[in-house]
Amino acid sequence: MTFIDNGLETIDLDSDFEVIEAAIDEVDTISLFEVESSLVKILKKWSDASEIVPISDKYKGGTLILQPADTSLKSYDIPIDKFFHKITMVRDRLRVMEQRINASDLDEQGKIDLQQYITRIYGSLTSFNVLFKSKNQQFVGQRSK
């Protein structure tokens, strides 16, 4: 008689089964939590899946207004939350690109050159850091030495 308890199948010792390979004192189990944790790490590393990044409280529900200098032209309004989401997607995709560069077959100098270029892109995006609630989620460009 067999039964499954919390993902583990238990087999009675007197059951009929064929031993293909015996492993003494080895238990090779993994919990559902470990599987989920590994999957989350893989998705963060290799996909466009992004974490939830909170916007600064003072901009929640606000509107970004792009007003042309020519007053006869209509302004462009976008909810700041939507704009912020687009900024965080750019950041997340840059992170994925960095990881793919690091894992690529490029020579070391090629990787360094592309990494420096990405760092400069981050630096160009630091103007948007005022939108981030948490400082650790902001863009960081090249630091002065």
Image (cartoon, rainbow, N blue to C red):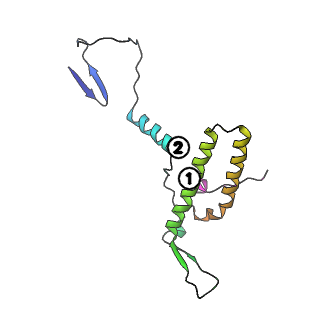
How far is the residue under mark 1 from the one under mark 2? Answer: 11 Å
Mark count: 2
Q: Give above or below for 110 relative to 90.
A: above
Residue ranking furthest to the left: 1
Dot 1: element: helix
- Image location of residue 125, percent across then percent down: 65, 61
Identify the residue shown where x is 70% and y is 37%: 107
Image spot of residue 130 (x, y percent): 61, 65
The residue under the point 46% across, 42% down is 40
For badge 1, the amino acid type reads Asp
Q: Is residue 35 left or right of residue 145?
A: left
Q: Which mark is residue 92?
A: 1
Give the numbered dot on residue 46.
2
Asked where in the image residue 34 lies, by quadrant, the reply is: top left
Question: Which span of residues is magenta-colored?
Answer: 132-145
Magenta stretch: dominant SS? loop
Indicate left or right for 69 with 63 as reference.
right
Locate residue 141 relative to residue 4 in the image: left or right.
Answer: right
Name the disc covering residue 39, or none.
none
Mark 2 lies on a secondary structure that is helix
Q: In the image, is residue 70 part of the stretch drawn in magenta?
A: no
Left or right: residue 6 compared with residue 139: left
Residue 55 visible at all: no
